[in-house]
Image: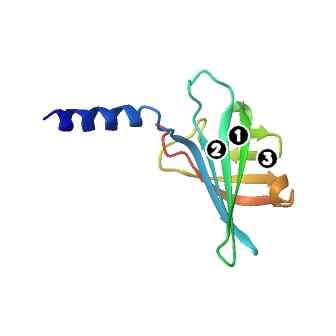
Amino acid sequence: MKSLVLTFIMILSSSAFASFNEVECEVSTATSSLFLEVEQPFPTSSVFKRATLTSTDTSGVETNFNYTLTTRGSRGFNRLTYSGAGLNLEVDLWPDQRPQWGRNYRSTLRATDIGNNEIQNVNCTFPNAF
């Protein structure tokens, strides 16, 4: 009985520090497949967010790049901009004013680690929006 209670407490305590993704984006280019995930900050009052960009080339080799980002919203144009040193992601939320769960949004991505080229038509979702 003690081991069952101990196991239950360990499972609960480890899930307390789990991070949730605020936005997930993916796109395929001619040379690679890109996946970007931006985590919600902890505590939620923090303005800085962590992001990981995963690049998978045609031979299947994965490379991860980590960033620290801030968010800026433009309500008049229904856009969210995630920017930091080396990465800029602009999400077009139109026709919504704020991200909605289950919706896909077009985005533009620019990162110095992947050649600093502007990649358009990036597909982004907000898995924890409500």
Disc 2 secondary structure class: loop
The disc labelled 2 sits on which kind of residue? Leu
Marked residue nearer the N-terminal end (2 or 1): 1
The disc labelled 3 sits on which kind of residue? Leu
Marked residue nearer the N-terminal end (1 or 3): 1
Which residue is located at x 62 percent, y 54 percent?
25
Q: Which residue is mark 3?
A: 87
- Left or right? Give the position of 122 relative to 16: right
Q: Of discs 3 and 2, which sits in the foreground? A: 3
Marked residue nearer the N-terminal end (3 or 2): 3
The disc labelled 1 sits on which kind of residue? Arg
Which quarter of the figure is the N terminus placed in? top left
**Callout 2–callout 1 Cβ contact below 8 Å:** yes
Q: Residues within 10 Å of mark 1 (few under 14, many from 20)?
A: some
- Left or right? Give the position of 54 relative to 126: right
The residue lying toward the viewer, choosing from 86 and 16, is 16
Residue 79: mark: 1
Which residue is located at x 64 percent, y 74 percent?
60
Disc 3 secondary structure class: strand
Q: CA distance from mark 3 to mark 2?
A: 19 Å
Q: Residues within 10 Å of mark 2 (few under 14, many from 20)?
A: many
Q: Which residue is mark 2?
A: 93
Coordinates of residue 73 in the picture (x, y in percent): 71, 32
Disc 1 secondary structure class: strand
Q: Residues within 10 Å of mark 3 (few under 14, many from 20)?
A: many
Does residue 78 sit above or below 116 in this rendering?
above
Q: Is residue 114 visible in this depiction of the protein?
A: yes
- In the displayed image of the protein, which residue is found farthest to the front? 2
